[in-house]
Image (cartoon, rainbow, N blue to C red):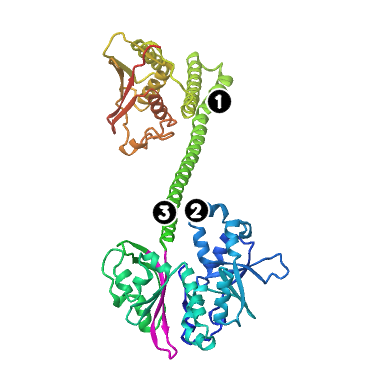
Amino acid sequence: MALQLGSSLASLIQPTGRLSALVESVPTVPCTLSPRQLAQILAEDPSFTGLVLTDPDDDASSTPIGILRRADLGSWRCSEQTWQQNADRPLSEIGDWWDPCQKILPLEESVSLQQAAQRWVESGQGGIVVGSGLGWGLVDPLQLMAAVWQDQPQCVEQNRDLADLRRQNEMILNSAGEGIYGLDMAGKVTFANPAAARMIGWSPEELVGQSMHDLLHHSHADHSPYSRVCCPIYLAFQDGQIRSVSDEVFWRKDGSYFPVEYTSTPMRNEQGQLVGAVVTFQDITQRKWAEEIFKQNQEELERKVRERTAELRQANQQLRELSDLKSRFVSMVCHEFRTPLNTILFAVTSLERYRHQLSDQAQHEYIQGIQSDIQHMTQMLDDVLLLGKTDARKLEPQPIELEIVQFCQTLIQEMQLIQGQPAICFERSCVNQKVYFDPVILRSILINLLSNAMKYSQPHQIVELRLKAHTDQILLEVMDQGIGIPEQDHPYLFDPFHRGRNVGTIPGTGLGLTIIKRLIDLLAGSIEVESQLGVGTTFRVRLPLASAA
């Protein structure tokens, strides 16, 4: 904590000789609060330099048992791990932190400055707590020292033992952990305590009579010159205003520098004339380091929050897409099952009521229609189940030896028998070719490709299946002369339940191409699409050949 002489030391312009002139009113709080709670109290009012601590279990709870200075919190925060371990525990239970806080010297406000300074030196305690009719307040020992030093002429008149007083003042200066030095109106050093000399690498004797600005304040951190005219330290004894700065650097004798927090307080003689300034400062390297660590942690936390927010947004988007898929699935199932079920019901009812009136050919057509609708629903259920297996990664290829040409010919015959027109033309680059493939997966791929080609073609048009076998893969091409696929639908061809905008009333579930793509991915293959509206579509599938088990 930088020495804050502030408004209290301003009273030295006209010294009262009493301790009450230096008392700073601060809040009184129980010692059972946690360091985090105490830090929050200090953060609410930056003007408080500390807190008076009392025992809430004591009947005389107004009696102070310790003090907490803002600098104590700063030193505790230097170790992030220790702070996190202790920040929420009662302060009175943290021995390493609580013990120093209890080193206090209670005084009455009527005590003179000289008596207060003498009792503080003799007691060897850390903080001074002063009681008054309005409660308890704090006195900074260094402010007391400065006040006693400023009031020395009066002290000599009241007490002729000047040697003892000077010795006491010297002890106070030497015991201070912060740098303190005095300047005359020319900016020359009149005194400097050991802490000040040690921090900048000089001895106190070397500093006396030197221009302190030329020694330690001549340049900014970027090495640019720092004009004395702009220096807050010198402005303090030119206009009589206290200056406090925490964003500059002091330079050491060896040419290095350190971040510093300092206060320049003007000094006046008995006639109220400015005679110089007292400067108190401290090296805040640790604080800056802690602030940088805090800033880095804060940035890291913000980065993680941004990443987590993005993940949550993505998860929400996926949930919305899943909800949309479920709605489309339910709608598709309802529509695709209702139509064939209605057709089957109508056919069964007609056969039941008018069987004797219908010819054998008409009855056969009704039965064929029922069979076709049942096959359609069965295929749709198979597609949904197959899609579910690929999603759950439960489908594993089971390759066996196949005669690929015969396999394709048999499949084409089955489809022609079931769907009739249009005709399927089969072309191949080999007569007989044995390969290792999972027949169920290969069948699903070809059936979906050929079914789509036939569904979106006119009966008089031709659907072609071309087979080309290579040493490491087979190429399957399914070409039709049907309605084609609009270019706007190409990016969504393999999305579940997506159907082209030009299909009209042609029935379908929008699952066929999704199943094809996932099965091809399962086999580490690839699929390409070429299509032109009103001209036709070509699907080109490449599948790597499996080796014999």
State how far apart marks 3 and 1 are (Cα). Answer: 72 Å
| Disc number placed over residue 345 in the picture, else none | 1
Q: Residues within 10 Å of mark 2 (few under 14, many from 20)?
A: few
Using the image, determine if residue 403 lies above or below residue 286: above
Mark 1 and mark 2: Cα distance apart in space: 77 Å
Q: In the visual, does 447 lie left or right of 330?
A: left
The residue nearer to you, when weighing 253 against 8, is 253
Q: Quadrant of the C terminus?
A: top left
Q: Earlier in the sequence, mark 1 or mark 2?
A: 2
535 above or below 143?
Answer: above
The picture places residue 376, in percent across and down from the top left corner, at 47, 23
Task: Write down the region rendered in magenta.
Answer: 259-283
Residue at point 50%, 13% (across, down):
360
State the residue at coordinates (42%, 20%): 441
What x and y, as percent, mark residue 140? 52, 73
Kindly state the secondary structure of the residue where label 3 is placed.
Answer: helix
How many numbered markers are drawn? 3
Of the residues shown, which amino acid type is indicated by label 3?
Gln
**Residue 369: x %, y % from top left:** 48, 21
The quadrant where residue 264 appears: bottom left
Earlier-in-chain disc, 3 versus 1: 3
Q: Is residue 274 magenta?
A: yes
Q: Nearer the viewer, residue 402 or 134?
A: 134
Asked whether 159 falls inside the magenta stretch, the response is no
Disc number for residue 80: 2
Residue 269, horizontal then vertical, whole percent: 43, 87
Q: Give the Cα distance between marks 2 and 3.
A: 13 Å
Tell me which amino acid carries mark 2. Answer: Glu
Q: Residue at x 35, y 75 (%)?
A: 208
Residue 515, compared with residue 240, is above or below; it is above
> Mark number for residue 296?
3
